[in-house]
Amino acid sequence: MYPSMKTELAARDGDLRLCLLLGIAAWFLFLDHIPHNAVSLLTMRNFGFSGAADLFVFIGGYTAAILYGRMMLERGFVVTATRIFKRLWQLYAAYIVLFVIYIDLIGYVARKSHASELIGDFNVTGIVDHTIRTLIHGLLLQAKPLNLDVLQLFIVLIAIFPFVLLGMVRRPNVTMAGSIGLYAAARHFDWNLSSFPDGKWYLNPFCWQLLFVLGAWLALSSASQVRALRSLQEIPILRAAAWLYLLFALAVTLAAKFSHSGGIVTDLLRDVFLTHNKDNLAPHRVLHFLALAFLFAYIVPRNWPGFRWRVLQPVITCGQEWLTVFCAGVFLSFAGHLVLITGPDSLLMHILVSVAGLSIMTGAAYYVSWSKRQDHRPAFRSHAMAGLPEERRFAK
């Protein structure tokens, strides 16, 4: 089993579809995190039940399984767990830096601009009356400032991933079934993590782990399972059903935005499909995302010529450097919100703020990518000087 799994993982490594989707998710998260941003009307969440966060978590699980799955098979659990926890520390350190600077910056701007509503808008009200307690709870991932919830969720998911990956390597279907059971139990018994000063996590990790584990399960699936999935994609009635469900979700979502009193979308439809469907990852939200993934995998093959288009290279690069892009997007979304509430509130300003933020994020991704390439380049003239005597190598 292990040699075949290693072969499958090698075949799936380097899939540019993953980088493209991670880049799209990072861009959409930035646009969605700017409150009242008109450009965010173009993101995923406005055209169906699922959104950029779903895509981010699913692709995160898929890529993590590819990256660490081969290591697990070749070097064992202990070595792989240490590498995963090293990545976990990087994520946690990024979160701490973001949290401390983020809330301090919000408080400073709120005082200087006399815009006290910023503290409430960004959900850091405790920092005024209970500064030390808020910081301590922030270190424990119990504070929930606006826009950091996805990173907090990802930290928890990576923390449990060594054990999930071990189960996936040995008993993938049993592990997937356990994930589904945890999801169902968490929704039924209302399991969640508490937050400070009150309430619970906005993205319930007991529920959202389903998308992360599902991504890992698909990445580690056998050749026979992949063939079965591809054969399902060739069935016209299944593709038609997926399209119909996406159209239904689109109609409900759009109608809810433009209809404020019954009409096309009744109060029942609002309650069932649009109210509180994100915190505990409602089943119809999962189904919507799976329909999108099903059709995307069918329409965009791995060798899609569009990956060579120059217009897509910035998005792909942002997907390859997703952590840098995400962290930059958190600060830029706050800066964009500040510009919009203190400057002229016009469509042109919304577009300029969005384009500027995406450009800075893309520039940061290109810089990090370039910097990594420099680290792997040989020293200047090392090959030419290798055969010279030692005294001539250092002669001027």
Image: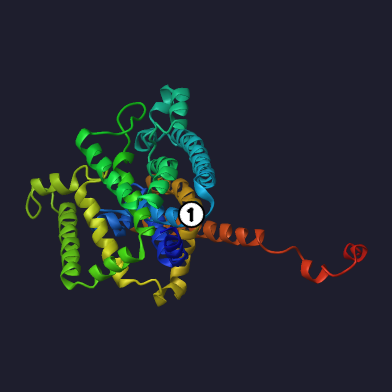
Residue 348 at x, y = what percent?
Answer: 37, 59
Residue 83 at x, y = what percent?
Answer: 53, 47
Q: Which residue is mark 1?
A: 73
Q: Quadrant of residue 153?
A: top left
| Quadrant that contains the C terminus | bottom right
Q: Is residue 248 above or below residue 119?
A: below
Badge 1 amino acid: Leu
Front in this rendered view, residue 296 or 202? 296
Side (left or right) of 5 relative to 40: right
Q: Is residue 34 above or below residue 250?
A: above
Q: Quadrant of residue 188?
A: top left
Q: Quadrant of residue 191?
A: top left
SS at circle 1: helix
* Residue at the (23%, 73%) spot, across then down: 234
Q: Is residue 128 above or below residue 258?
A: above
Task: Name, please, the residue furthest toward the front.
Answer: 1
| Quadrant that contains the N terminus | bottom left
Task: Name, please, the residue furthest toward the bottom.
Answer: 305
* Residue at the (68%, 64%) spot, across then down: 377
* Residue at the (51%, 42%) spot, across then down: 85
Side (left or right) of 308 relative to 188: right
Residue 278 at x, y = what percent?
Answer: 26, 45
Residue 4 at x, y = what percent?
Answer: 42, 63
Q: Is residue 171 above or below residue 190?
A: below
